[in-house]
Image (cartoon, helix red, strand yellow):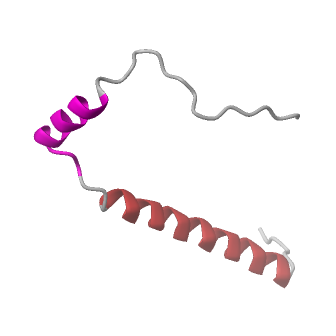
């Protein structure tokens, strides 16, 4: 089975795939470098800001037309 694809179309497909891979790697690297909060740090945060509310409140809400 053969698939015919124009050179520019192939170039765009490869370019998009590479962009996706780079974004995934950047996100993975970012998440690996976030330090976890120690128990003491979490206690300090709770003292400063209190416990999280049970009800979540949206920080930003937008409507979109489809």
Residue 13: which quarter of the image?
Answer: bottom right
Is residue 30 magenta-colored? no
Count of numbered tags: 0
Q: Residue at x 29, y 25 (%)?
A: 50
Q: Residue at x 77, y 68 (%)?
A: 1
- Chief secondary structure of the magenta span? helix
Q: Residue at x 46, y 67 (%)?
A: 26
Q: Residue at x 68, y 31 (%)?
A: 61
Quick check: 59 above or below 33? above
Residue lying farthest left?
Answer: 40
What is the quadrant of the C terminus in the image? top right
Is residue 42 magenta-colored? yes
Whole-percent x, y for residue 27 in the image: 46, 60
Residue lying farthest front?
Answer: 48
Residue lying farthest top?
Answer: 54
Residue range (magenta): 36-49
Whole-percent x, y for residue 14 in the image: 68, 75
The residue nearer to you, when weighing 19 against 35, is 35
Q: Is residue 50 left or right of residue 58?
A: left
Whole-percent x, y for residue 20 in the image: 60, 65
The residue nearer to you, when weighing 17 against 38, is 38
Quick check: 16 above or below 59? below
Q: Is residue 48 left or right of residue 13?
A: left
Residue 5: which quarter of the image?
Answer: bottom right
């Amino acid at each position: 089975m053969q698939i015919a694809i124009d050179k520019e179309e192939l170039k765009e497909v490869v370019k998009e795939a590479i962009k996706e891979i780079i974004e995934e790697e950047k996100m993975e690297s970012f998440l690996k470098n976030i330090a976890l909060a120690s128990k003491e740090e979490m206690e300090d945060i709770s003292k400063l800001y209190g416990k999280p509310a049970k009800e979540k409140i949206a920080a930003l809400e937008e409507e979109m037309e489809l």
